[in-house]
Image: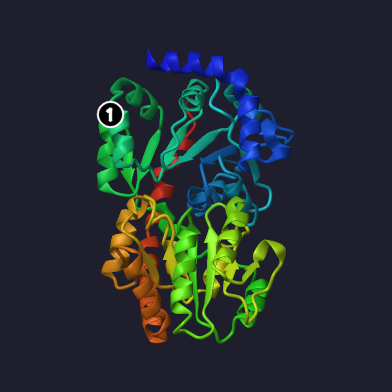
Amino acid sequence: MIQGLYRQATALLEPLAPLLIERRLRRGKEDPLRREERLGRSTASRPDGPLLWIHAASVGESLSVLPLAERLAGAHDAGVLFTTMTTSAAAALESRQPPGWIHQYIPFDTPGAVARFLDRWQPDAALWVESELWPNLLIEAQYRHIPTALVNGHLSDRSFARWNRLPAFSRRLLGSFTTVLVPSEGQGRRFTALGATRVVVTGDLKATAGPPPADPEALARLKGAVAGRRVWLAASTHEGEERLACDIHLDLATTIDGLLTVIVPRHPARADSIAEEATAHGLTIARRSQADMPDSATDVFLGDSIGEMGLYLGLGDAVFIGKSMLHHGGHNPREAAWLGKPTVYGPHMQNFTDIARRLVAAGGAIEVSDATSLRRHIAGLLGDEQACRTMGERARTLVEGDAAGVLDRAFAALQPLFEKEP
């Protein structure tokens, strides 16, 4: 009944989809040149031969599945259609995905948009990443006999409780997956309880993503521009954390000569307001989006570009992970760890609980409780180069060990997707 009501409701709302797109365009959340993709329409052509469809919502999920996608596509001589929800994920993929892959924005989960999308692309198999459960897309894919797997399946406490209130609906959705790959036994128990029929524990796919790339020439130029300065990075920040970073800079600059603070907002569309915030603090700003180079007078280098996290991490001596101090959830600390950077984060790392805990236990990260302790630990790391190196090495050793075996287990578990029915 719930499935039917959902389908009817989304069908009734479908005429309003263009209005939603316009609203999202005004907020910088849609690509104005590709809005029709959200309605299931496209000017791109389906490649000949088998096609593997991969869907991931945002940047972290997209990058986490790339090594597995490359291995599967190569082994089965398949083309790849990659869909994402966010423009930032599309930009990140543009510099990372192999030649010949096709990117599209995921259509809205309305019956018409879903039908147009699947009619056009006709994928032979599909991978969905983490917790993307769009009922119309998933059930229509099952009706069309498209084998679909959920990889790196993750349900937060809140999501698990919400789906548990709809047991028949959750069984219908999760039972549609041929296979569900999960990073841990605990996640496996959750998916099994909600109706998934084949659950395999592989470890966390995010562990296989490796270090984020950086243009070597651009990195060399920036390193030359900041040579001799102590640099800390506030990465993937959200509202309020930029103000905190500016406050910390003002405090630490009184004792650390030449201090440079690099701020990389999670959403670069907020860059103008962040620049105004920093200027109001009396700080001198250089902006990556305006091709500025930080000089000796620069207090804050604003990383307001997309897909260049590797560049910014390459500059930092110590890294603060955003959405962990003033907001709940946190962001992935592995990117910094792969590059041998010590990380500091607040108490709200719910989306990365396991790796955050183990990095702290391994001596590769520090968890702080408030702004005062964040300021103290950033100051301590910037004042002790050997401590930075030691923590960074411990962090890198941990993530390199995690990656071993995860890809092999996931690849083996997904072979049923490619087994043709007699």
On the image, the x and y values in percent for residue 240 come to 46, 56
Q: Nearer the viewer, residue 21 or 76?
A: 21
Q: Residue at x 64, y 26 (%)?
A: 19
Task: Left or right? Give the position of 43 relative to 305.
Answer: right
Q: To which residue does mark 1 refer?
A: 164
Task: Left or right? Give the position of 64 relative to 45.
Answer: left
Q: Residue at x 47, y 35 (%)?
A: 419
Quadrant assignment for the N terminus: top left
Q: Nearer the viewer, residue 366 or 189?
A: 366
Give the quarter of the image for residue 394: bottom left
Give the quarter of the image for residue 4: top left
On the image, the x and y values in percent for residue 261 come to 52, 72
Q: Nearer the viewer, residue 166 or 399?
A: 166
In the figure, 139 relative to 53: above or below? above
Task: Left or right? Give the position of 403 relative to 12.
Answer: left
- The 10 Å Cα crowd at callout 1, few under 14, some 14 to 19, many 20 or more, is some
In the figure, 111 relative to 181: above or below? above
